[in-house]
Image (cartoon, rainbow, N blue to C red):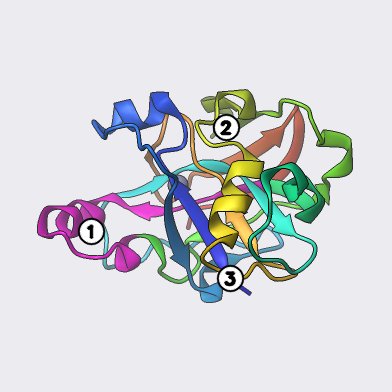
Amino acid sequence: MKIFCIGRNYVDHAKELNNPVPKKPLIFMKPNTALLVKGRHFFYPDFSNEIHYECEVVLKIGKNGRHIEPQFAHRYIHEITLGLDLTARDLQRQCKAKGHPWEIAKGFDFSAPLGTFVPYDEWKDKDIPFTLEKNGNVVQRGNTKDLIFEFSHLISYISTMFTLKLGDLIFTGTPAGVGEIQKGDLLEGFLDGKKLLNCNIR
Ligand code: ZN
């Protein structure tokens, strides 16, 4: 399975990191060894001193497809949840300065904690509000109505270049409010008030 991630897909987040708002979706990938599931703990690695949380709505693809038309794209979404696109911001800054790829900053082991999936059907055609709490305080508040490129656009665009397969995941981008994690932190993600994601930092 493949994990696609979308960068800068909310205007307020692009601005907080002084990045331009993209004209096309900004795509990168994580390997499947980045997944951290079932609420397992994240152990802070030695190679970074500045890991950021980015809370994102994650789509799970339910059938194979390529060159998917935007009007049919919703049929390819099977389930959704919240995930964290953990980012070694110090390494990413170095990569960006040199024009190097981002993999070491974004694709390292367990850099993609995932919440519990729920069926997508009940969310079809609805705005999806979500929040991330760090140690009980809300640090990110997002709503998919503020996406620059909505789900159907992302699926259509990705599928022109990559065959989408059953079980592939799409991290759809993070709203403003990203920040550092520290050992001892508890991160909890809520989709429309329902807790789906739990991650302890150790
Ligand atoms: Zn992200």
Q: Is residue 131 above or below residue 92?
A: above
Q: Which mark is residue 91?
A: 1
Disc 1 residue type (three-letter): Leu
CA–CA distance between discs 1 and 2?
Answer: 25 Å
Q: Earlier in the sequence, mark 3 or mark 1?
A: 3
Q: Which mark is residue 133?
A: 2
Q: Residue at x 63, y 61 (%)?
A: 67
Image quadrant where one finds the N terminus = bottom right
What number is the disc on residue 2? 3
Q: Is residue 200 magenta?
A: no
- In this view, the mark in front (2 or 3): 3
N-terminal of the pair, mark 1 or mark 2, is: 1
Q: Residue 100 magenta-drawn?
A: yes
Residue type, mark 2 in image: Glu
Q: Marks 3 and 1, Cα distance to the nearest angstrom?
A: 23 Å
Q: Quadrant of residue 17?
A: top left
